[in-house]
Image (cartoon, coloured by chain):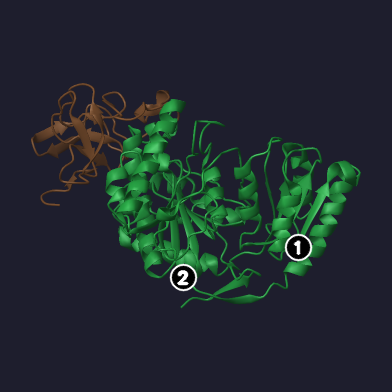
Amino acid sequence: MSDIQGFLRNDGRKGIRNTLVVAYLVECAHFVASEIVQQFRNTPHEGEVQLIGFPGCYPNEYAAQMMEKLCTHPNVGAVMFVSLGCESFDKVRAANAVNASGRPVRTLVIQRTGGTRSTIRAGADWVRQTLAQIAAVPRVKMGVDELIIGTVCGGSDGTSGISGNPAAGKAFDLLVAEGAACIFEETGELIGCEEIMAERAVTPELGNLLRESVQKAERYYATLGYGSFAAGNAAGGLSTIEEKSLGAYVKSGDSPISGLIKPGDIPPGAGLYLMDVVPDGDVRFGFPNISDNAEIVEMIASGAHMTLFVTGRGSVVGSAISPVIKICANPDTYRNLSEDMDVNAGDIIEGVRSIAEVGQEIRDLVVAVAAGQQTKSEELGHREFILTYKSFEPIGPACLPGAA
Amino acid sequence: MSGKSSFGPFLLLSDKDNVLVARANSPEGLEVALESGPVQLGRDIPMAHKIARHDIAPGDVILKYGMPIGIATEAIDAGAHVHVHNIRSAYTPTHMLQDADGRSAGVSL
C-alpha cells in the first residue's frame, strides 16, 4: 500500500505533480516565455510554473510529437504556448492536442500581443488565473503499479557500474515486482551488451529487435566518430565505451525485458522496457542525445513520473515536469556534492551498506517522492529541459509482445 | 564466485576477470598481494581505476564483470595500471583529455 494521492487527468492517467508549463515554440520566444515563468519566483507557486521549449524554426515531426506528449503528461495540469508568430512549429496542432486532453491551454503570439512587455503581462495574468483553476484537479489514490519510472546515468565513472547502477537495478527489480513500468535507455551506452540483453527479452523476436537497436547505435556513433563517452568518463577510470556500457547496463536490474519503445511511446503495462533513443535512417541532425537532459525529457515523453539519475563524477541537474532522484555512486563525490544528492550509493564502495540496502532505499524514496516529497534538485529549483531535432520510424508490433 | 574477491583495496568483480578495480585511492608503492605474488603499485591508482590481476599479453581481451571491455595494446605486468594508455575499445575510440590518468587537471588522490 502507498499514500500516493495522484492528480487525476481526464484521460484517466494520474500525475504526481501538478505543474503549469510555459512552452516557447522557437528560440525567438524563449526570453519572453522565461520571463513569464520568472514572475512566479519567490511566490508560493515557484517550482509549479516551469519552462520548456523547442529552439528551432524549421519543422520536425519528432519535436511536434514530443511537445504534445510532454504537454499532456500526467504531471502537467495546464499549458501556455509562447510563439513569436512566424516560426514553423505547428502551434494550432499542439494547442488542439492539449485542449483535447481536457487541460487549460492558451497560446500567445508575441507579434500579435504587443511585444515583449505586453506578452509577459498577458502570460503572467493567464498563468495566475489558471493556477487557481488547476488547484481543483481531483486527487485520487494511486498505487506503485500506476507509476512509470525512468533511469539514466550521467557523469559516469568507474564506481557507477559497481555501486550506483546495480543499486538502481535492484530498485527497478523491486518496482517491477510491484507492478510499475520501468524504462532504461541509452542504446549508445549498451554497446557490447547486446547479446546478454537479448537473452532477457520475453520473446525471441523482441530479443532480435533489442540486438538490432544496439547495432543501429553502433553504426550511428561510428559515423559520428565519437562513442557516447565524455572525457570525464576516462578520468574516472573508464577506459572504453564497452566498459562504460557494462556498468550502465546493470541499472536495468534482472527483470525480463518486456518491450522496446521509442521516445513518446507509453509502456502498455508493468515490466521493464528499453527505450531506443538513436534516430532511424541516415545520420542527420547530429548526436542522438547531446546531454543527459535530452534523455530525461524523452523518458518523460514516454510517461515517466520521475527519473533515477546515477552519477559518479557528480551531476547536479533536475528536470522540468518530472522529478529527478540523484544517486551518487562515488563516495568522494557524495561528500563533495551532498547538497545535490538524494542517495549515497558510495556506501557500497566503502562497505558500509549492501547493494540490496541501497536498492531498497531508492525504492522507498520513489514512493515518497510520488507522495509529494521534494527531491534535492526540486528543492534547489533545477528544472532543466532540452528538446532538439531527431527523426524516428514508429515501432512495430513485435516491440511490445505483451500489448494486446 | 570462488576464491578471493578482494586484494587489499582492489576488488575482483568476476572470477573470469584479468583486472581488479580500486575501491579507494591507492598510493604509489602500496604493496598488493596478488595471486602470483606481491607487487608494488608503480603509480597512484585513483578510486575506480583498474590494475592487472596477472600478466597480460598484447592482443589479450580485457575482462571486467566477466565481460570484454577492450583489447590490450601492449604487454601489461601484473599490478600495473590498466587504462586508455594500454587498452583500446573493440568499437569506437575513447575520447579523452589530459586528465585521463585520473590525477592531473584537478583530479587528485
Name the residue rendered at 50%, 30% in the picture.
A283
- Badge 1: residue crowd in 10 Å (few <14, some 14–19, many ≥20): some
Q: Amino acid at mark 2?
A: Asp
Of mark 1 and mark 2, the one earlier in the sequence is: 1
- State whether residue A155 appears in this view: yes
Q: Amino acid at mark 1?
A: Pro
Give the residue pinned by disc 2. A145
Task: Name the residue furthest left.
Answer: B36
- In depth, the one of B52 and B71 nearer the eye is B71
- In depth, the one of A339 and B53 nearer the eye is B53
Give the residue pinned by disc 1. A104
> With respect to residue A220, does A71 lie above or below?
below
Question: Which chain is green in the picture?
Answer: A
Task: Name the residue furthest right.
Answer: A114
Name the residue rendered at 30%, 23% in the picture.
B85
Question: Which chain is brown in the picture?
Answer: B
Q: Work out which quarter of the rendered image holds the C terminus of chain A and state it.
A: bottom left
> With respect to residue A190, does A205 lie above or below?
below
> With respect to residue A313, does A297 lie above or below?
below
The image position of residue A94, as x and y in percent, is 71, 52
> With respect to residue B27, does A368 lie above or below?
below
- Badge 2: residue crowd in 10 Å (few <14, some 14–19, many ≥20): some
Q: Is residue A82 left or right of residue A297?
A: right
Mark 2 lies on a secondary structure that is helix
